[in-house]
Amino acid sequence: MVFDPKIDVSFTGKCNLVTLTENTLPYDIATNPGGWTTGRETTDIILAHVAFYNSDQTPGVVAEGVGFISGTTFTDTTHTSGNFAVGQILVGSGILPGTTITALLTGTGNNNGGTYQVNISQTTIPGTIKAYNLDSLYVLYDGTIDVYATAVGTPTPGSFIAVNEATWNNPDGVYSVVYTIEFNDGETYTNQEQKVLFLCNLCNCKNALILKLINACDVETVKKLKEQVDQMEIFIYGIQSAFSCEDYDTADAIITAATTYCETISGCVGCGCGGTC
């Protein structure tokens, strides 16, 4: 059968927060053949999460094993595939969102019984643990977390907010959004290819320049600030145009140039919400 999970992403006007709206909707043969239905209900889910990858990363599981976490130590009791490494985010039943490998202890990446240090102290029972190379991951269901349980219409809910203003700490860029749902019959589904553009920091940089322009008094300062605002608007327009044409490499290149320009004229690093401008 066809199943097509859908997720909408919004940064709600704030650089450091993201909201995810689950929008798979109930099955309808004419208008929504990939929606929730018998055998593909929310009560059949054993794992669900939304991952964000930047343009130079490949979505998917990069390592897997059967193991557990005690304190800040992850033990890969029985290794299955791939190689665990520093920077990977771990996903599994009961694992706290954002759990990331920070150091190799006795682990070589793929040895049975290898241990790895993680950033969040916790205790989990033995089970399958998967690792991802990504920027952010938001768990919707893992046996402990269940955002579907209270959604109107469950087990075949309508549109609902799955994650409301969660922490987002990533820089401006083009991100792939991968919504993965695994069901209790072993089948796993992901959404269709989906990209989002995050430009909040550059927009904040431009807005800070506009505020300075409004408060400027002397002619030379006004002229200089107007040129800087115009340049930022050109950057932002170019990024949005490239993104709308699905030219993501060009969009990323302009983002890099615009960020450097912002940091140069403002004298700070990480302009926008995350900076000290």
Image: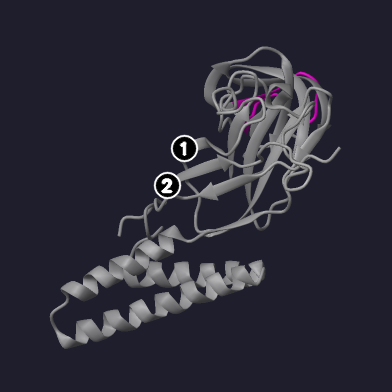
| Segment tinted magenta in the rendering | 102-117
Look at the image and say whether residue 114 sits in the magenta stretch.
yes
Say if 256 sits above or below 154 in the image. Answer: below
Question: Callout 1: 10 Å neighbours few (<14), some, many (20+)?
Answer: some
* Left-right relation of 128 to 213: right
- Residue beneath label 2, please? 16
- Marks 2/1: CA–CA distance: 12 Å
Q: Residue at x 29, y 71 (%)?
A: 209
As drawn, the residue found furthest toward the top would be 125
Instruction: Answer whether labels 2 and 1 touch (C-beta < 8 Å).
Output: no
Which numbered dot is residue 164?
1
Q: Quadrant of the N terminus?
A: top right
The label number, if any, that marks residue 107 in the structure image: none
- Residue 239, given in percent of the width and then of the height, sits at 54, 71
Is residue 82 inside the magenta stretch?
no
- Of helix, strand and loop, which one carries label 2? loop
Amino acid type for the residue under numbered disc 2: Asn
From the viewer's perspective, tell me whether residue 238 is left or right of residue 208.
right
Could one spot residue 10 in this view of the protein? Answer: yes
- Please state which amino acid type lies under the numbered disc 1: Asn
Q: Nearer the viewer, mark 2 or mark 1?
A: 1
Tell me the residue at 52%/25% (across/down). 120
Question: At 68% across and 57% down in the image, what residue appears?
Answer: 56
The foreground one among 56 and 268 is 56
Q: Earlier in the sequence, mark 2 or mark 1?
A: 2
Say which element carries label 1.
Answer: strand
Q: How is the image coloured?
A: one colour
Q: How many marks?
A: 2
Q: Residue 144: image x %, image y %?
A: 60, 18
Q: Position of residue 104 (x, y in %)?
A: 66, 30
